Structure formats: structure tokens, C-alpha cells
Amino acid sequence: MGGMRRGPTGPGHRRGRAAVLAWLLASSGAAYAIGCGLESDRLPVVARGRYVEIATLRDEPICGGTARYFDRFIESGMALLGEVPPDRRFVRFEWLMPPAEQLSVTGVGRTRHVPGGSLITSDDSLVHEHELAHAIHGAALPSTNGFLQEGFAILLDSKRIYGDMVWPEGESIDRVISEVPFSYDDYPLAWFLVSQIVRDHGFDGLARFWRAVEPGASAAEVREAYQATFGRSIDALVEPIEFEDPVLGHYEEVRHPCNFSLCLAEPEALVDGAWEASGPTDCEDDPDAVGPDRRWYLPEFGDVWRQQVLSTGDAAYFDISASANVAMELTSCSLDCGYVGNGSSEFGFDAEAFWLGADRSFRVEVRASLEDLPTQDPGTLHVEAVSPY
Ligand SMILES: [Zn+2]
């Protein structure tokens, strides 16, 4: 578990160039756990976890639970692939200055696999699950074709910007699976394909197939690898799923990409039909606070949060209420391929009852605005079961 360390100046102070240089000099004797491939001295490290270090020149606090959140994300993502992370800091996250103007819809994040680990740069999001997912497969799996790498990164990113879709009529699967370099325009198709692989074969199946696809493999080679791994044609991934139902008879279901999030806290059950979660009390001094989130498309609901995981147990409908200054994001901890919204949900709290479903786990983020922190009176979220069905 990693503590937060402040840079040369605390929050609210300007980090002038002189101060940073002085700090770099002062810390030049410090040994970084990461190899020299990670360009360790470029930016000062402001937070450290077990597997990550976060470096930035930004004049912003890094909330106290952020590095640990990265650690848990990495641990959980590696576990999906049947691996454990190396027990050292192998991911360096460089949070760059914000872009002068918004040029990209995702913000510019990039992951480079370098000797000893991964170097992530981001000029937008601090909590950039997509790029962390690239660091995960970089440690767990060999390099492969773009559709697998991008599809995996999008699937693991609960804050993805892509919404529901179906495989476009006439779209060539061969073009997508062999594309080098992988085009940004095809990211949703990569997500679609990887979703279906995980849906049909699990994450372990994805890992087996991944290992069978050499980087730069042609469409024919990818097809062959899929056939050899799973004993069927890769075309099945874009064809409807067929069901035989004792009541409904034979029917088909068109495939949709899947929603998924890694749940990074212990699931909590309702007690006597109720559950309450509290938002952050502070940024830097709250060991459970994550952020600040700086995605430009973030809804207004607060840039600092605490993540909790709710298990619904045998109830399915819930009353959800929140005190002022709290918003929540609810995403499913298991693969959910029915209908995908925008990846994050914003709720009004005036509905009669929300259906969440029985025996499911949800990632719940109780958020606050950085400018309102610290606070003695964090917002709370109150969830109450109203009926079993
Ligand atoms: Zn990517």
C-alpha cells in the first residue's frame, strides 16, 4: 500500500520552475524502483503506490487514495488474465499540463512499453483506466494486433466514452482484425469484438487467443488462430446468438458490446435492507479519495470520489437518495452485454424505485467537488431495498 507524497510545494502554492528544479536536485540521490527506461527524472513524483508512481508539474493536489486505486486496478486487471503484477513499481504515470485547447475527444493518453514497465502520459485524465489497461496487458501478455489491445483497454475502462452499438452492416471483420496501425475510428469495433470474445470464452479465453496472435498477423492468420483456439469461425463474434428456450422456443439475440468495470473495493451488503456510503472528506488527506478527475466531458457531478462496491443480495428494486453535493456513478462489476449506456450513469433521485437486479455488484462512486473540500460534512448516499423482485 502506498502513501501519498507531496511534491516540493503543497496544494495551493504555485510550483514555479525554480522550485521544481530545486526539488529535482534535492532528490537526485533518491533511487527509483523503476528502470531508467521510464525517464524517471523528467517530472517530480508526487504519489507512489506499490506498482505505480504518479509524476506531474501540475499545480493540483493528488487525492490520497489515487495511487492505491491505480494499484488495485492493476492487480484486478492482471488477475483477469491469470497473472499477478511484478512486486515493484513498474508503471509510471505522467500527468502532463492540460492541453491549450481540446483537440481530441478522449484527451491525449498514451502508453509506451519501455524496459522494466510502462510509461503512461496523459494531458487530460488523471484516473485513466484505458491507459492503465494497456500497462496491464503490457505486463501480462505479449504484444499483439491492435484490435485486441484497444478492445481490452476500452472494455476495462468504466469511463469509456463509447455507447451502445451493433456490428455495422457490411463491415469487414477481416479489415479490423488485421489493421496496422489501429485507427482511432475503429475503437468501438475493437471494443465490440473483445467484448464478444470475453462473453463467449471468458478472460482466460481472451488471453489464450491473444497469445496465438502475433503482432502484424494477417486476417487469415488471426482467423486461423481463432479457429484453432476455439474450434469455430471468428465470424461467430458478429453473428446473433441463438437460444433454445423451453417456453420461447428458438430465438436470436443481436450482439451488443459489453459494459464492465473492475470493482476495486470489498463488496458491501445491505444491512437490514439499507446501505449508506459517504463521499470524500478531503482530497490529499483522505486516504480513500480518488482524483481529481479532469476529463473534459465529465458531467458536473464532482471531480473527487470514493469508490465503494454494493452487493444487492436478494433485493432487486431500491430507493436511492443522496444528500446535497453527492452524485453517484453505478456500473456493473460483471460483464453486462444487454444494453450499454454511456458507461457512466447519472441518476436523478426522484424515481419511485430503481431496478438494480438481485445478486449483482455495482461500483458506486460518491463524488464531491474539489473546491468544496475539505469538509466536515461529506455527502452521503443512502440505498434502501424496497422489494425482493
Ligand atoms: Zn488505447
Image (cartoon, grey):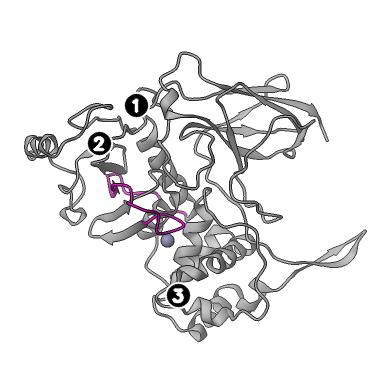
Is the residue indicated by label 2 positioned so its CB lies within 8 Å of ligand 1? Answer: no
Could one spot residue 246 in this view of the protein?
Answer: yes
Q: Main secondary structure of the magenta part?
A: loop
378 sits to left or right of 272 = left
Tag 3: residue type? Val
**Pointers 2 and 1 in contact (C-beta within 8 Å):** no
First to last magenta residue range: 82-108
Q: Indicate which disc, 2 or 1, sits on the residue closer to the N terminus.
A: 2
Residue 238 included in the magenta stretch of the image? no
Number of other residues with Cα within 10 Å of mark 2, as a class: few under 14, some 14 to 19, many 20 or more: some
Disc 2 to disc 1, C-alpha distance: 11 Å
Q: At which x and y percent is residue 32?
A: 17, 43
217 and 294: which one is in front? 294
197 and 296: which one is in front? 296
Q: At which x and y percent is residue 38?
A: 21, 54
Task: Give the answer, above or below, for where 208 lies relative to 83.
Answer: below
**Pointers 2 and 3 in contact (C-beta within 8 Å):** no
Disc 2 to disc 3, C-alpha distance: 38 Å
Tag 1: residue type? Glu
Residue 213 numbered tag: 3
* Residue under numbered circle 1: 284
Q: Indicate which disc, 1 or 3, sits on the residue closer to the N terminus.
A: 3
Q: Indicate which disc, 2 or 3, sits on the residue closer to the N terminus.
A: 2
Where the N terminus falls, by quadrant? top left
> Residue at horizontal 16%, vertical 36%?
16
